[in-house]
Image: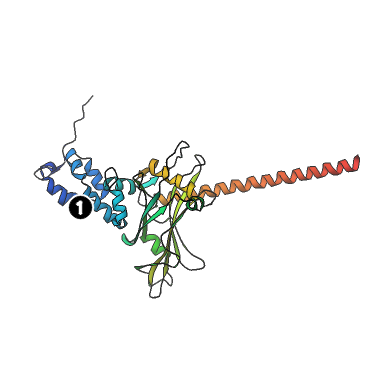
Amino acid sequence: MVALSAPPPTTIQGGTISALHPDILQNHILTLLDGPTLTAIACASSELHALSAEDKLWQNICTSTWPSINDPTVRSIIATFPSGHRSFFSDSFPLLHHNHHSSSFSTASPECFVSAVDIYYKNVPIFSVVETTETLSDWFKSSPFRVDLLEPKEFVQTWIQHQPSEKELSMKQLEENITLSWILIDPKGRRAMNLSSERPVSVQRHWLTGEVVVKFSTIMAGDGGEKELVESGVTVCCGEKEGGEVEVREVSMVMNDMEGRNLTGKDGLVILQEALERGERRKGKGGNEGKGRYGEFVERKKERKERMRKFEKALDMVCIGTGIAFLVSFWTFILFR
């Protein structure tokens, strides 16, 4: 058997990268990297691993990726994470995959959760907000799970201009250029996850208002068995004012099961907590993986609806047959007794 030699050290012109002064590496090279690249660099050597663990590096990456986390509330929460901003990034950057529910999962309900939300157009932030949702009240637990970031008549003006060739705001324009990050943070559990498909899973025009409704979605395991799934859907409504400027008029999140019913706050919180603690974080593939999972979810909903329709039809036939048999038996008894 041929022995495998250790890989050669990372080199630069004139020697190894380790020959560079740590200050040069940390302040002039590592600061130029994005999160995934910095994570890969940290695996190259023990020296680079130590240098890349500096929280300031990860803080700069996180705040440039998600402007909303500059909020003092979020900053104080991130400070409690095991490795600070590096832990927050590893929780929040990859897409969430949570396909298996465990009936044995049990945990104390948090007092609240914090949403850090950023909307981008052509990778430039156009909307950033932080919302804290209280979860212990009976009103939250019994009401449909819903988080609204704007009041009914509130809107956010953007610098987006609709295409001059279009009479109305183009759906294609938004579908190709708008992206979203919705980071849900559990302050008590010191965990976070991104509840967004990154890119839209559907874009439609509202039949009455003419607004463009952009939908993002994350599919998670429900609590009704292996085949039960739950959708966490984020809706962004955009409208056009006079002059062609685009406004963000609604940003909200709801949770629905495969029957299309809204989950209550209590049921939704259980699913979110399990996804926070047990969900896998994976790097998406070109931003289309979330849309593919949403398409599978929609198909499974259609299949379930069709099965229910056939079952109800068969049940109706059984009921009709039973009624006819009873009627025939009754009149036979009356006529031939």
Residue farthest along the top direction in this orientation: 1
Q: Residue 167 placed where, x, y %? A: 43, 72
Along the line of sight, the residue nearer the viewer: 263 or 143 = 143
Relative to residue 124, is residue 310 drawn left or right? Answer: right
Mark 1 surroundings within 10 Å by alpha-carbon count, few (fewer than 14), some (14 through 19), many (20 or more): few
Which structural element holds mark 1? Answer: helix
Relative to residue 56, is residue 275 drawn left or right? Answer: right
Q: Residue 150 placed where, x, y %? A: 41, 62
Relative to residue 324, is residue 302 drawn left or right? Answer: left
Q: In which quadrant will I find the C terminus?
A: top right
User: Quarter of the image holding residue 165?
Assistant: bottom left
Compared to residue 137, the image places residue 156 above or below, namely below
Q: Residue at x 40, y 75 (%)?
A: 242
Along the line of sight, the residue nearer the viewer: 222 or 97 = 222
Asked whether the viewer can see residue 305, the reply is yes
Total labels drawn: 1
Q: Give the colour scheme of this rendering.
A: rainbow
Q: In which quadrant will I find the N terminus?
A: top left
Asked whether the viewer can see residue 296, the reply is no
Q: Which residue is mark 1?
A: 32
Q: Residue at x 15, y 47 (%)?
A: 25
Relative to residue 103, is residue 96 drawn left or right? Answer: left
Q: Residue 102 placed where, x, y %? A: 46, 37
Along the line of sight, the residue nearer the viewer: 98 or 291 = 98
User: Hey, what amino acid is under mark 1?
Assistant: Leu
User: Quarter of the image holding residue 323?
Assistant: top right
Q: Residue 265 placed where, x, y %? A: 48, 50
Residue farthest along the front direction in this orientation: 137
Q: Residue at x 18, y 44 (%)?
A: 51
